[in-house]
Image (cartoon, grey):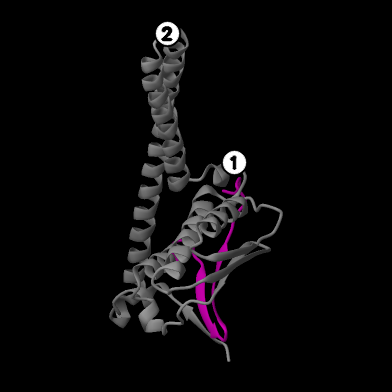
Amino acid sequence: MSQEVPIAPSDTGPVAEPDNASSEGTRSNQLASHLQASIEVERSQLTRQLHDDLGGLLVGALMDVAWVEARLQSPELQAKLGRARDSLRAAVDLKRNLIEGMRPTLLENVGIFAAMRWHFAKYRESGALQCHANLPATEPALKPHVAIGIYRITEEALRLISGPLRGRSITLGAEVSGSSLQVHFSHDGVALAQLELVELPEFKSMSERVATLHGMFTVSHGAPEVRWQFVVPIEPQGAQ
């Protein structure tokens, strides 16, 4: 029989005195929101530097190596330059992977559902999890902080389910209903009790992110799967 338990932001931290619970919970959420926003700003700046500055240097070096390689007569030197060219190309690939890991370009250029499908596909290809994504074809117009928040929750859910909870299969679903977005994960990992679950760092982070988006997180235990669900209000990209 399924049992649904709402996870409130206060479930993830110490219990405050009744008179101060509301104000302390608000301050805690504001601090978490500020820290998350600061981290995302730093990531965005770093990805820009990697793309523009380091990317430009690597492309320039590759062009120089190709120019010299075409004019060398010595097979030995050509072989050395060939290895240098291969190393530079590997560095370009590493740079691209770092950028995608910190802030996927699909998220900004296409939308949240495309980025979630891509992330699930990476996990599926790695063999870490059997991943299935049932997502709408139409992308919702989200504000940047909402989109990146939902994406980070998805990342943390996959890490938690494939790691501490020892899951082997996960199904992701989402629905847009009016001014809210519902996202749910069904998995076959360990069904921990609420008090154990909220002590896991990954789950704490997920819950805090949902709270900063003014959403609600619920956990349902029902054989043979566990279902996590969060609902967050969404605003169109141009909303004030």
Decide whether residue 219 is among the magenta residues: yes
**Callout 2 environment at 10 Å: few (<14), some (14 to 19), or many (20+)?**
few
Q: Position of residue 189 (x, y in %)?
A: 48, 76
For disc 2, the marked residue is 73
Q: Please name which of the two marks, 1 or 2, marks the residue nearer to the observer.
A: 2
> Which residue of the protein is positioned furthest toward the bottom in this rendering?
1
Q: To which quarter of the image does residue 87 belong?
A: top left
Secondary structure, mark 1, is helix
Q: Can you tell which mark lies on residue 109?
A: 1
Q: Nearer the viewer, residue 108 or 214?
A: 108
Residue at 42%, 8% (x, y): give it: 73
Sooner in the amino-acid sequence: mark 1 or mark 2: 2
In the depicted structure, whether residue 167 falls above or below residue 56: below
Residue at 49%, 65% (x, y): give it: 214
Decide whether residue 99 is among the magenta residues: no
Q: Could you tell me how many numbered marks the image carries?
A: 2
Q: Label 1 sits on what residue type?
A: Asn
> Which residue of the protein is positioned furthest toward the front in this rendering?
75
Drawn side of residue 6 relative to residue 27, left or right: right
The CA span between labels 1 and 2 is 45 Å
Q: Quadrant of the N terminus?
A: bottom right
- Magenta residues, start to end: 211-240
Secondary structure, mark 2, is loop
Q: Position of residue 122 (x, y in %)?
A: 53, 54
Q: Nearer the viewer, residue 112 or 41?
A: 112
Q: Position of residue 169 (x, y in %)?
A: 55, 71
**Callout 1 environment at 10 Å: few (<14), some (14 to 19), or many (20+)?**
few
Residue at 42%, 82% (x, y): give it: 192
